[in-house]
Image: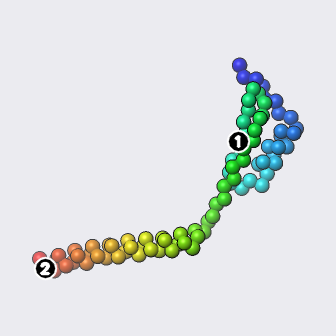
Amino acid sequence: MAKPLEVDQQWLKRIADQVGGLQYGSVNITVHDGRIVQIDRTERTRYDQPSSKQQEAQGVKQQAGNSHSNSNSNSNSNKHQTA
């Protein structure tokens, strides 16, 4: 049978301190034998705007995709003209 969890004011403050100011992420509480023994905080940073290098790479991919589709349509139109 599981032991009841022992949580005092000190642990409640520690947990509140870890959660406070956290925009994106998680707080993981590890319990051993009914006692809190560890608190892990994982914070994520989200960027709404891609970096300039990512934007450049995206533009290159789009240009490559457009030129590929244009070459296919040109070769298809050439086939129709010779037939």
User: In the displayed structure, would residue 3 be above or below residue 8?
Assistant: above
Q: Residue at x 51, y 74 (%)?
A: 56
Number of labels in the image equals 2
Tell me the quadrant of the picture where the N terminus can be found. top right
**Where is residue 78 drawn, in percent x and y?**
19, 79
Q: Residue at x 47, y 74 (%)?
A: 59
The quadrant holding residue 79 is bottom left
Alpha carbon distance from label 1 to label 2? 69 Å
**Where is residue 12 drawn, in percent x and y?**
83, 40
**Where is residue 15 drawn, in percent x and y?**
79, 43
| SS at circle 1 | strand
Type of the residue with mark 2: Thr
Q: Residues within 10 Å of mark 2 (few under 14, many from 20)?
A: few
Residue 69 shown left or right of residue 58 in the figure: left
| SS at circle 2 | helix
Residue 82's mark?
2
Which of discs 1 and 2 lies nearer the camera? The answer is 1
User: In the displayed structure, would residue 43 be above or below residue 28?
Assistant: below
Q: Residue at x 43, y 72 (%)?
A: 62
Tell me the quadrant of the picture where the C terminus can be found. bottom left
Residue under circle 1? Answer: 28
Residue 14 shown left or right of residue 55 in the figure: right
Q: Which residue sits furthest right? A: 9
Type of the residue with mark 1: Asn
